[in-house]
Image: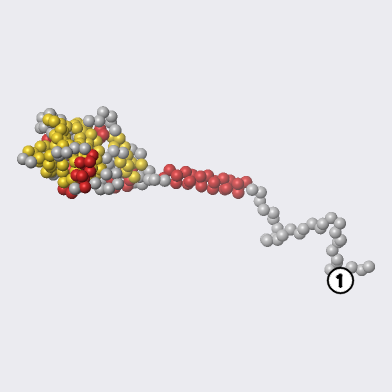
Amino acid sequence: MKAAFELAGEPRAQLGRTSARRLRKAGKVPAIMYGGGEAPESLVLDHNTLKHQMAREAFYTSILTLKLGAKAQQVVVKAVERHPARPIIMHMDFQRVREDVEITLNVPVHFLNEAEAKGVKDQGGVVNHILTDVEVRCLPRFLPEYLEIDVTPLELNQMFHLSDIKLPEGVKSATRRDVTLVTVVPPSGYAEELRQAAQAAAQAATAAAAAAAAPPAPTGAPGATPAAAPAAGAAPAAPAGGAAKK
């Protein structure tokens, strides 16, 4: 069962950047609601309440009930503007939905059994997410909270595409290309490790070949050092047992 989300808003009377800054300082979020064959409406939401709701992934792929006074409207989130450095929601865009009109929305992809993938468990690879959401088109009642794909069969350097996901009833892809979603790749630095190992093996083979081709060492008493030849013009050594006679 999908989560139910309700938001309470107020009409926004004043527009412009100055007004938006005042609203944000007061803990409010400027927003706009459009579509559904009606004119756009500017509104204001409570920041903390909205932030709490947005902490749940399902918020972005659910049909929300947005209340403005006594009027309740079914909407989906179309855009979120956040502060670049602070956890502040700057602006929200909502699109009205009608039961008989298809909507287009990005839906997250959940990758199942990553640790059990063949390329990870048996080949030491790493799961690499290329895309974590895909754009789908459907009637509001068929809108899925998320899509799933089991990556257990993936081997090293293999990949799954969008066409490998079985879409729920009434849901079709809004992406024309069959994009890549996930692949199993060698771990970071793996290619460099292979290159270094191959280089070390080649150096060892070269050293072994050089040792085999070297001439054998001279024979003689173990550890003996050949006597040095006398230098040219040097006097002969004195005979043993005494000094040389004159």
Taking the view exactly as shown, the residue that stands out farthest to the left is 70
- Where residue 46 sits: x, y (%)? 16, 46
Looking at the picture, which amino acid does disc 1 mark?
Gly
- Where residue 177 sits: x, y (%)? 28, 29
- Where residue 231 sits: x, y (%)? 82, 57
Visual colour scheme: secondary structure
Point out the image quarter for the C terminus: bottom right
Q: Residue at x 15, y 33 (%)?
A: 40
Q: Nearer the viewer, residue 207 or 140?
A: 140
Which residue is label 1 attached to?
242
Q: Nearer the viewer, residue 104 or 213?
A: 104
Point out the image quarter for the N terminus: top left
Relative horizontal placement of residue 212, taking residue 69 as reference (left or right)? right
Q: Residue at x 12, y 30 (%)?
A: 38
Write down the quadrant of residue 65 in the picture: top left
What secondary structure is marked by label 1? Answer: loop
